[in-house]
């Protein structure tokens, strides 16, 4: 048996074996997949948008006093959809939004959507579903007031919707989130729409 000594150049250029654990993928991409700066920006953007949705849910549920007074909160009998849809709707869809304002089914769908989208974004799981549902919700909210107050057609709802789609396309759930672990679960494996 002949033993050969590996040169320093060969040792440096050979890919090293990486010890992988379920938690090593929480904060690191596959080696060389993308830079740390991009991962940080994607992670912060995902967390920020998740907080936008989750905060709206919490404020409407408990009436934390920022946008929703305590006595108007959902747990005190208020409707999370009635105020904005009944009194704020302007434009071509006004009658549609007036008709659904305060409806129990609309309140439940809206609140479940806010909570689920916000939680999924913060955790980094189900990014495609969260981005799709979030984009639909944001475009509907945009369509309540047309044209927007400060622009001919563009406002923050449309920009947020585009950012959500971008986050899903870039697999942002893997950037400081649980996306990589989520993708390996039996529930998700083979179901691309749940990634």
Image (cartoon, rainbow, N blue to C red):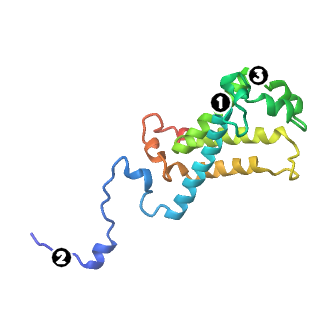
Residue 82 screen position, x and y as percent: 79, 28
Query: Label 1 neighbourhood size at 10 Å, few (<14), some (14-19), many (20+)?
Result: many
* Residue that numbered label 1 is attached to: 61
* Residue that numbered label 2 is attached to: 5
Tell me the residue at 67%/38% (across/down): 56
Q: Kindly report the distance in space between the C-alpha atoms of the residues bearing marks 3 and 1.
A: 16 Å
Foreground residue among 94 and 88:
88
Query: Label 3 neighbourhood size at 10 Å, few (<14), some (14-19), many (20+)?
Result: some
Tell me the element at label 3.
loop
Tell me the element at label 1.
helix
Q: Which tag, 1 or 2, sits closer to the chain's start? A: 2
- Checking the image for residue 103, the label placed there is 3
- In the image, which is nearer the foreground, mark 3 or mark 1? 1
The quadrant in which the N terminus is found is: bottom left
Q: In this view, does 53 lie above or below 162?
A: above
Residue 51 screen position, x and y as percent: 61, 44
């Amino acid at each position: 048996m002949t033993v050969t000594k590996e040169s320093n150049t060969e040792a440096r250029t050979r890919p090293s074996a990486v010890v992988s654990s379920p938690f090593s993928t929480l904060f690191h991409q596959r080696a060389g997949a993308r830079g740390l700066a991009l991962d940080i920006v994607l992670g912060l953007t995902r967390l920020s948008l998740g907080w936008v949705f989750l905060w709206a849910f919490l404020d409407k549920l408990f009436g934390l006093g920022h946008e929703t007074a305590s006595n108007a909160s959902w747990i005190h009998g208020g409707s999370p959809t009635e105020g904005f849809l009944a009194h704020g709707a302007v434009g071509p869809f006004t009658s549609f939004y007036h008709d659904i304002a305060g409806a129990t089914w609309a309140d439940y769908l809206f609140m479940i959507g806010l909570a689920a989208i916000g939680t999924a974004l913060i955790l980094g799981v189900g990014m495609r579903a969260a981005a799709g549902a979030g984009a639909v919700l944001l475009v509907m909210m945009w369509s309540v007031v047309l044209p927007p107050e400060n622009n001919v057609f563009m406002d923050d709802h449309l920009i947020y919707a585009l950012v959500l789609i971008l986050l899903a396309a870039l697999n942002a759930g893997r950037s400081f989130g649980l996306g990589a672990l989520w993708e390996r679960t039996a529930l998700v494996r083979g179901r691309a729409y749940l990634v």
